[in-house]
Image (cartoon, grey):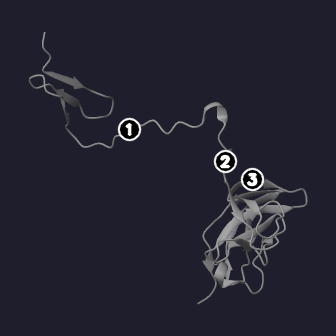
Amino acid sequence: MTVDTITLSLAETPPIVIVFEGGAAPTLVVEEQQAFVVALPGVQGLPGGQGPIGPSGGELTAVAGAALNGHRAVAYAPDGRLVLASCDNPDHLLAVAGLIEVSAVEDEVVPLRISGPVTLSGWAWAPGPVLLGLNGQLVQSVPAGAVFVQALGRGDGTRLFVDLQPPYSLGA
């Protein structure tokens, strides 16, 4: 028995036709263009979990460009290192990087929280937006002298759910 044509009908897709012509390699004909996702195997990691552990979700690492206190907002300086972010500094308008949860000394690699929950017993956030303040402070009202406003997330008691939002310039 010789098979000349095989037609496959997949749920909610047009029929797929595979044509065999005289023993040659089959030709795939799709009657209507569809987006297909093909999963390819990735690179095999080191056996036995011997590879380095990466940062947790919502977290990166960066280098401190100065001594930094924990639970402060930080921005990237022109050299790529972290400094305290400040809403009165126009250079930080598009440079806010996230929140550091631990103190760091200059040139130390520090975890940088870019999303997700952070809890601190000393916080008492009213439910709502938490904004970038002056010199890394987190606030819920825009401070005097601000040149831009940026929500870093939303607060709820002792928790801050970090979710950086685009900044809004207050300048002309």
Tell me the element at label 1: loop
- Which residue in the rendered view is the most extreme toward the right? 122
Q: Name which residue lies at 66% across and 49% down.
A: 57
> Residue at (74%, 64%) from the top-left corner?
99
Q: CA distance from mark 1 to mark 3?
A: 34 Å
**Vertical placement of 160 versus 42: above or below?**
below
Q: In this rendering, is residue 77 above or below 44? A: below
The disc at residue 38 is 1
Lower sequence index among marks 1 and 2:
1
Quickly name the residue at label 2. Answer: 54
Residue 158 lies left or right of residue 9; in this view the side is right
- Determine whether 25 is above or below 107 in the image: above
Q: Closer to the camera: disc 1 or disc 3?
A: 1
Residue 75 position in % (x across, y down): 69, 72
Kind of residue indicated by mark 3: Pro
User: In this view of the protein, which residue sits in the foreground, 64 or 2?
Assistant: 64
Q: Nearer the viewer, mark 2 or mark 3?
A: 2
- State the image quarter where residue 165 is shown: bottom right
Q: Which residue is mark 3?
A: 117
